Image (cartoon, rainbow, N blue to C red):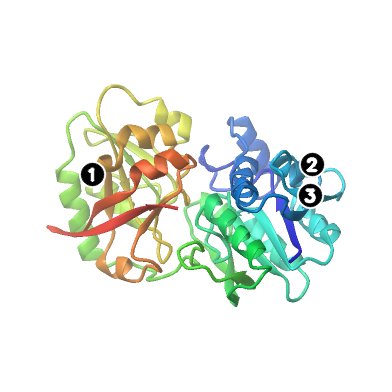
Amino acid sequence: MQIGVIVNPIAGMGGTVGLKGTDGPDAVAEALRRGAEAQSGPRARRALAILAKRCPRARLRVAAGSLGQCWASDLGLDLDVVSAGPPTGTARDTREAIAVLGAVDMVVFAGGDGTARDVAGALSSGAGMLGIPCGVKMHSGVFAVSPESAGHILADLVEGNGRAGWTDEAEVMDIDEVALRAGRLAPRLYGLARVPVVANRMQAAKGGPRRDSAAALAAAAHECARACEPGALYIVGPGSSAGAFARALGHEPTLLGVDVFRDGECLVQDATAPRIESFLDDRPVRIVLGVTGQQGFLLGRGNQQISADVIRRAGREGLRVLATEDKLSTLSAAALFVDTGDPDLDQELAGFIRVQTDRGRFMMMRVVAS
């Protein structure tokens, strides 16, 4: 089985600095100005290290330089390096890399929904794709749930010489980032892709009910808000479920950003990772989260502003999760996933957590390191 590898070096850079993505050169420049650091290369290397451990000397065709080769070198893999010219930091890099990879059975890419669009649009007919999740917004059904899961899927395919279950109906979704930064969610289906079918290692396309039950969610949020601990720092994640908590405190939330509260006062809205960390002191930290529809992610999808250091301070016992029973019942797996960027922290968070679904009502859900 001939496997090609492409890394989008700028994917995910906007997450920690509150930009909701890095589509376009202006967004990349602003992310760098705010101190963003590259995410996709190291995450791609985590996936490829799993493949190298299980399948030493596995053969891959990789794009040269930061588009692939840099992150696959020194792992003991057999690399066929192809050059597509100097990177431009635009979608053209992905399209040109696909072209020079030539005839491959599958392209493994490190990026987000924008990269998935570019890969799907440039693939030859019949070729498969697999995403290593690195972006801010990953609504498409072409991604593994974590870099490690992507590595294990790759190893399974190599060991089985490509014999695996496949579907040609994985949704490739993307969201208008300009609308997203203005607080409007504008998803669009761009097509269907061929991906491996691997239970518990591939994420579903984000979907499920478009609206939660307003009454149940509001009641759960008000009860959670009344239980706020004096002096504790409350970090409220994006989405309508977590946003209901902010409204219960008397504030309008940043629907697609992260807000910070203490003693009912809003300290900052649409905060970046460094700004959130600036509020840390010796007082407790609590993180209020919703659940992504269908996918079941708590951390690592759209809320990268909440850094691993902040999450570690809160711990699993410091997470406050709000979701309706309808949303939980439509998850693709009976679990909630975390992908903090720190595999050790993901393991620390694993276990069971109470999800508040209504006033006085809770469901126990398993937290799983993705």
Which image quarter holds the N terminus?
A: bottom right
Residue 249 - label: 1
Q: Which residue is mark 3?
A: 79
Secondary structure, mark 2, is helix
Please state if 68 lies on the left or on the right of 292 as rendered: right
Q: Earlier in the sequence, mark 2 or mark 3?
A: 2
Identify which residue is drawn at 27% across, 22% down. 282
Picture coordinates of residue 50, whole percent (x, y):
59, 49
Count how many numbered circles sit on residues in the image. 3
Identify which residue is drawn at 67% across, 58% down. 108
Q: Earlier in the sequence, mark 1 or mark 2?
A: 2
Marks 1, 2: nearer the viewer? 2
Please state if 285 lies on the left or on the right of 268 as rendered: left
Picture coordinates of residue 94, whole percent (x, y):
76, 55
Q: Is residue 18 above or below residue 326?
A: above
Identify which residue is drawn at 52% across, 68% down. 198
Query: Answer yes or no: do the residues labelled 1 and 3 have beta carbons within 8 Å?
Result: no
